[in-house]
Image (tube, grey):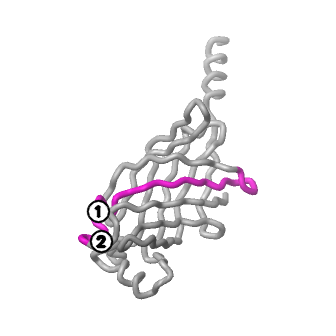
Amino acid sequence: MRKYTLLLLVVLMGHFTMAQYKPVDKGSSVKFEIKNFGLGTDGSFSGLEGTISFDKDHPEEAKFDVSIDANTINTGNGKRDNHLREDSYFDVKKYPRIHFVSTKISRSSSGTLTISGKLTIKGQTKDISFPFTAMPNNGCYLFKGSFSINRRDFGVGGSSTISDNLTVELNIVTVK
C-alpha cells in the first residue's frame, strides 16, 4: 500500500493544471512591416480569438491556438486595404482567419522562450519558430514576440512589387 501511495504522490506532484487565457484586442497589437518599391509599409490586424494554456513555471507545456480576422487588415489606406482583401492577396472571403497553433515551446539555459508551431495563411500552413516573452499582466499575461515570413510561401501577393519578406510583431494581452 505504501508503494502505491508514494507512486500516486509522485504522479500528482508531476501533474499540474495549466491556467487558461484568451487573447483580446484591447491593449494587443498584431503589426506587420513590408517594403513596397523599397519603402517601408506597415499595418495591423485585429479580431483576436483563441485559447492559450500557460504556466510560468512550466512554459514547455503551454499550448497556443490563436487566430486573427484577415478582413481587419489596416494599413491606413482604405483603397490599399480593400485591394489586400482580394483574391490575389488575402482572399478574405475564402480565408477569413489567419491561424497559429503551437507545436513546441522550449526554454534555453538562459531562460529565453522559443515557440514553434504551424501558421496558416490563405489555406497554406508552414512551420515557424520565434523567441517570445511572457510578462505577468493584471493576473494574466502579455506575450511578446516577432518573426519574419516569406509572403510567397503563403500564396499572398503573387508577382506584386512588394518585398517577399515581412516582419510581424506581436503584443498579445490575455484575460481569463
Q: Is residue 126 magenta?
A: no
Q: Is residue 156 magenta?
A: yes
Q: Residue at x 46, y 41 (%)?
A: 104
Quarter-of-image position of residue 93: bottom left
Q: Is residue 75 left or right of residue 142?
A: left
The answer to whether mark 1 and mark 2 are in CB contact below 8 A is yes
Q: Is residue 131 left or right of residue 91?
A: right
Callout 1: helix, strand or loop? helix
Which stretch is magenta?
136-159
Which of 106/80 is in front?
80
Task: Identify the residue at the far bottom of this view.
Answer: 79
The quadrant the N terminus occupies is: top right
Which of 91/153 is in front?
153
**Label 2, on which residue?**
157
Task: Identify the residue at the far left of this view.
Answer: 159
Q: Position of residue 128 (x, y in %)?
A: 40, 49
Q: Residue at x 36, y 76 (%)?
A: 92
**Label 1, on which residue?**
152
